[in-house]
Amino acid sequence: AQRVTQPEKLLSVFKGAPVELKCNYSYSGSPELFWYVQYSRQRLQLLLRHISRESIKGFTADLNKGETSFHLKKPFAQEEDSAMYYCALSAAGNKLTFGGGTRVLVKP
Amino acid sequence: DTEVTQTPKHLVMGMTNKKSLKCEQHMGHRAMYWYKQKAKKPPELMFVYSYEKLSINESVPSRFSPECPNSSLLNLHLHALQPEDSALYLCASSQDIKQAYSPLHFGNGTRLTVT
């Protein structure tokens, strides 16, 4: 069975400060990992996926198989980054399992 | 068209009613999904359709009945629901379930209230 854990329910940071959202997973196979974001009054949307190894809106995430982690980082948070962030793992059949979510609040 | 469209946006129904939720996408995706999201909780998978065939049923009660009439449409038929079924129901699509790295595109959801 697959499981995704996001230990922080709420992260509050000041604008310009670094932000790191933690994500740990358990899965017996080779994981495909994603970060999804939901801005206020918008639909849930993909932020980035580990296979792409890209930076989106200044965010990066590195898959660490040894620590079974996929933490999301941004060096300088912006107010528009305030949103709900979900880490997700895709298993066979593209069965996507979400973590509990972390709400990020960026204060001016 | 790069969106998943869900109707209605809101639905209030009694426990004896029969209603349907609708979902449509025109991105040529061959996998479609229903998720249920309770307040302040992550989405939970209910059903997966692949090439119009039911691929995954996450032990969902039979009062929820999915249907995929064609590759662009996905319905969720509701009958004899309970108040605890009140939630946001999300539809999503992706290119193919064989590609686990293929991201899901979500609709805005239908907010369902069962009275």
Image (cartoon, coloured by chain):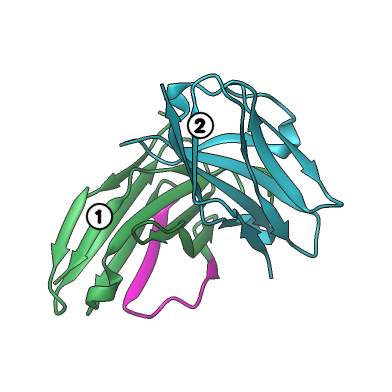
Chain colours: A cyan, B green
Image quadrant of residue A106? Answer: top left
Q: Kindly identify which numbered label has been placed on residue A13.
A: 2
Q: Which residues are magenta?
A: B55-71
Note whether B75 is above or below A56 in the view shown: below
The residue identified by callout 1 is: B111
Classify residue A2 by image quadrant.
bottom right
Callout 1 touching callout 2 (CB < 8 Å): no
Q: Position of residue A76 (x, y in %)?
A: 59, 20
Q: Nearer the viewer, mark 1 or mark 2?
A: 2
Check chain identity for marks 1 and 2: say if they share one. no
Residue B33 relative to residue A32: left or right: left
| Place of residue A70 in the rendered image (x, y in percent of width and height, measured from the top left) | 71, 45
Q: Chain of mark 1?
A: B
Q: Is residue A31 left or right of residue B62?
A: right
Which residue occupies 45% across, 48% down?
B92
Q: At 56% across and 55% down in the image, what residue appears?
A: A99
Kindly identify which chain the residue marked by label 2 belongs to. Answer: A
How many numbered callouts? 2
In percent of width and height, residue B40 lies at 38, 56
- The residue type indicated by label 2 comes to Val
**In the rendered structure, does residue A77 fall within the stretch colored magenta?**
no
Kindly identify the residue that appears in the image at 43 percent across and 36 percent down.
A83
Q: Residues within 10 Å of mark 1 (few under 14, many from 20)?
A: some
Q: Secondary structure at mark 1?
A: strand
